[in-house]
Amino acid sequence: MTGFDLTELLAERGGERYDLHGRHLNHQLPRMLHTIGFDKVYERAEGAYFYDAEGRDYLDMLAGFGVMGLGRHHPVVRRALHDVLDAQLADLTRFDCPPLPGLLAEKLLGHAPHLDRVFFGNSGAEAIETALKFARYVTGRPRVVYCSHGFHGLTTGALSVNGEDGFRDGFAPLLPDTAVELGDLDALERELGRGDVAAFVVEPIQGKGVTAAPPGFLRAAQELLHRHKALLIADEVQTGLGRTGDFFAFQHEEGVEPDLVCVAKALSGGYVPVSATLGKDWIFKKVYSSMDRVLVHSASFGANAQAMAAGLAVLSVMEDEQVVANARHTGELLRSRLAGLVDRYELLHEVRGRGLMIGIEFGRPKSLGLRSRWTMLQAARKGLFAQMVVVPLLQRHRILTQVSGDHLEVIKLIPPLIIGEREVDRFVEAFTAVMDDAHSGGGLMWDFGRTLVKQAVANR
């Protein structure tokens, strides 16, 4: 090979992908993928589909954990990135004010007119870190309240407001924090009464379990916080940019105006990592209170031209192609068709969510035969039945989904926001076939369940 040729490199060594990960990266990832049969090789992707070497399509109902809001390789975003590279801009000089960050900030703030300024970073966790720092600085208080089962990232500050012990174990000490249950206003008021709370950070719909804040909770929480001179931080990293059928999920509740809003994921167009922390003018002016503090919070790659171009292209596509309206319409179609199956299958407990963020929850069946199998799985590890559903969806029907969280019997659907009735039909038909198999009392699904039980017991 002369010089660097990416195409040639991939042709020569692409087949080593799982071995390379096992030797040089997280060695448990290939092990896990081999165990559950997810060790596929995808050759290319377009829109809501992956394709293997034989040209078979796989429907993506995961969207890279929500990153691929427009699907993969949207032509408008691709063109914008080609254009920004070809422009050879003087990027990241650190001592100028390039136009693209200002233009993207202007566009984003247009969707949250009560907010005034934006800080650009590189990931959802970084957006949360920014909000935590700003809230603690402007209030002069150390403690942050968050929700049980919430997820806000895995860097140290974000981990401090993570509601899952499995992520936190072994990484203490963290920031001063306290968890309350989503919807528990009394618990929130008790914590605020201690006088040391800087902010309450909340997902309008929790990614883990797809649990929405109860009606009226965010508005009431906001009033409590402001009465106690604390801030409301809305984590819209996954729910923002149209995912729930409104541009931001907090907009489903009238009168909710968070002090800080964190976005990321879909803003990238699936190409360039980018995040944004939107906030009120007084917060930014207090953090950046003088020229001496001009760099008191910054990011080396924040507001780079490629990320800004991707974000601008994403927002343009969302407007031109009415992506938010499609998420609302298609999401309601998918949710209602799945909800119609609850009475048909005793293992299917509930279907919930908003827009194209849908949770499918499984529960204890009534019939003796199914109940004994369910009990076997639960004794080994809670969440195994949901995994039993995810695997045949991929193996037999070529549909990629995910279990919503550890020890949860919930599948989360967060597909690209561009899907339509064709994809809804395909998923519902496949899911129905898998449920029919699960209720048949035997077959490959329960054979695989026994394999999962053995694996779960071996890992204890």
Image (tube, helix red, strand yellow):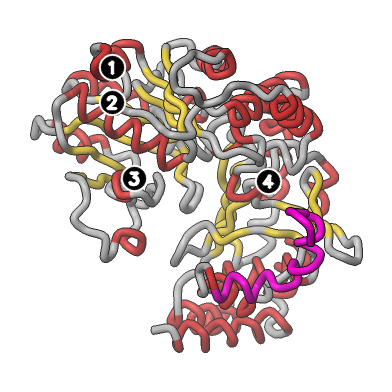
Q: Quadrant of the N terminus?
A: bottom right
Picture quadrant where residue 330 is located: top right
Q: Residues within 10 Å of mark 3 (few under 14, many from 20)?
A: many
Q: Residues within 10 Å of mark 1 (few under 14, many from 20)?
A: some
Q: Which residues are magenta?
A: 1-23
Q: Give the amino acid type for the residue marked by disc 2 in the picture.
A: Val
Q: CA distance from mark 2 to mark 4?
A: 38 Å
Q: CA distance from mark 2 to mark 1?
A: 7 Å
Q: Are marks 2 and 1 in contact (CB under 8 Å)?
A: yes
Q: Secondary structure at mark 4?
A: loop
Label 3: which residue? Answer: 158
Q: Is residue 300 left or right of residue 145?
A: right
Q: Secondary structure at mark 2?
A: loop
Q: Is residue 111 left or right of residue 427?
A: left
Q: Nearer the viewer, residue 231 or 277?
A: 277
Q: Give the amino acid type for the residue marked by disc 4 in the picture.
A: Pro
Q: Are marks 1 and 3 in contact (CB under 8 Å)?
A: no
Q: Give the amino acid type for the residue marked by disc 3 in the picture.
A: Ala
Label 1: which residue? Answer: 288
Label 4: which residue? Answer: 415
